[in-house]
Image (cartoon, rainbow, N blue to C red):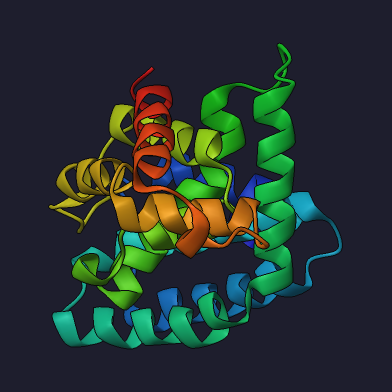
C-alpha cells in the first residue's frame, strides 16, 4: 500500500481501503498478509488510534474476503479469531472506555458515528468469526464494558450504517440484541456488575420488576 499510495500510517491505509474496497479484487494471500499485519498492529500499535484503525482495517479485509471461496473465508476468520479477538482484552477495555467518554462528552470533532466505529468493527468481526447465532446482548454489553448507553448507541449507528458485506442477518441480529437487553437475564447481569454486593435473594420481586421496567424505559428512550 505504501508503494502504490505512499501511505505511512494505519489511518492512511484504512482511508485508502475505504475508498477502494468496492472495486478492489484481492487474493487470499494478499488478504492473509494484510490481516496478519493489521491483527498484530491492533494489539501492539504504538498509539490507541493506530490500534483502532488496525481493527477497522481487519474488518475491511474480512469484507473484501467475501469475494473468496468459503474455505478461504473460514481460514481468514480463524486467523482473526486467534490473532485478534482472543487476545484483545486490554485494548478492548481501552477502546470501550474511550468511546464511553466520547459519548458522555461529545464535541464537534467527535461524532457518534466516529466514536462507535472501532466497536462496530469489533462486533462485526465477532459475528463473522464466532458465528452470528453465538453473539447476543450479553456479548454486546461485555464489549462495551457494561455501558448500556454505549451499547444502544453502537446498535443505533450500526443499523444506520451500510450493512457489512457477508453479514446478511446483521440488521436482524442487532435488533435481537437490543431486545435481549431488556430481558431479565441481561438486566440481572447488569445489576450484578453495577452492584456486586447485592443479594438477589433479599431483593423483593416487585422491586426487581420495577427496576427492570425503568431499565427498559431508559433503553426505549
Quadrant of the frame with the N terminus: bottom right
Q: Looking at the picture, tell me which residue is in the foreground, 48 or 149.
A: 149
Residue at 63 percent of width and 73 percent of height: 88
Side of 50 relative to 137 (left or right): right
Looking at the image, is 106 positioned above or below residue 54? above
Quadrant of the frame with the C terminus: top left
Looking at the picture, how far across and down is residue 206, in whole percent? Answer: 35, 39
Side of 47 relative to 2 (left or right): right
Residue 68 figure quarter: bottom left
Q: Looking at the picture, tell me which residue is in the foreground, 211 or 70.
A: 211
Looking at the picture, how far across and down is residue 117, in whole percent? Answer: 53, 41
Residue at 46 percent of width and 42 percent of height: 18
Looking at the image, is 24 positioned above or below residue 22? below
Residue 24 figure quarter: bottom left
Q: Is residue 56 visible?
A: no
Side of 20 relative to 97 (left or right): left
Residue at 78 percent of width and 54 percent of height: 48
Looking at the picture, how far across and down is residue 36, in whole percent? Answer: 56, 81
Q: How many marks?
A: 0
Residue 128 figure quarter: bottom left
Residue farthest along the top direction in this orientation: 108
Residue at 31 percent of width and 27 percent of height: 160
Looking at the image, is 151 positioned above or below residue 184? above
Q: Is residue 165 visible?
A: yes
Looking at the picture, how far across and down is residue 51, in whole percent? Answer: 71, 60
Residue farthest along the right direction in this orientation: 46
Side of 94 relative to 200 (left or right): right
Q: Looking at the picture, tell me which residue is in the foreground, 67 or 186.
A: 186
Amino acid at each position: 500500500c505504501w508503494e502504490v499510495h505512499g501511505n505511512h500510517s494505519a489511518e492512511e491505509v484504512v482511508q485508502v481501503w475505504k475508498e477502494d474496497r468496492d472495486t478492489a479484487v484481492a487474493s487470499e494471500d494478499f488478504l492473509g498478509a494484510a490481516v496478519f499485519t493489521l491483527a498484530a498492529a491492533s494489539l501492539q500499535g504504538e498509539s490507541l488510534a493506530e490500534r483502532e484503525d488496525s481493527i477497522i482495517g481487519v474488518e475491511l479485509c474480512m469484507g473484501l474476503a467475501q469475494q473468496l471461496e468459503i474455505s478461504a473465508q473460514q481460514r481468514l476468520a480463524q486467523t482473526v479469531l486467534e490473532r485478534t479477538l482472543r487476545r484483545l482484552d486490554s485494548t478492548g477495555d481501552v477502546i470501550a472506555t474511550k468511546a464511553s467518554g466520547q459519548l458522555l462528552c461529545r464535541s464537534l470533532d467527535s461524532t457518534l458515528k466516529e466514536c462507535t466505529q472501532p466497536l462496530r468493527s469489533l462486533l462485526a468481526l465477532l459475528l463473522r468469526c464466532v458465528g452470528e447465532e453465538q453473539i447476543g446482548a450479553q456479548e454486546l454489553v461485555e464489549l462495551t464494558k457494561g455501558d448500556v448507553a454505549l451499547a444502544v448507541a453502537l446498535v443505533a449507528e450500526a443499523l444506520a450504517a451500510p450493512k457489512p458485506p457477508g453479514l446478511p442477518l446483521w440488521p436482524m441480529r442487532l435488533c435481537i440484541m437490543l431486545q435481549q437487553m431488556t430481558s431479565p437475564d441481561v438486566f440481572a447481569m447488569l445489576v450484578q456488575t453495577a452492584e456486586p454486593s447485592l443479594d438477589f435473594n433479599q431483593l423483593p420481586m416487585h422491586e426487581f420488576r420495577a427496576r427492570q421496567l425503568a431499565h427498559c424505559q431508559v433503553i426505549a428512550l
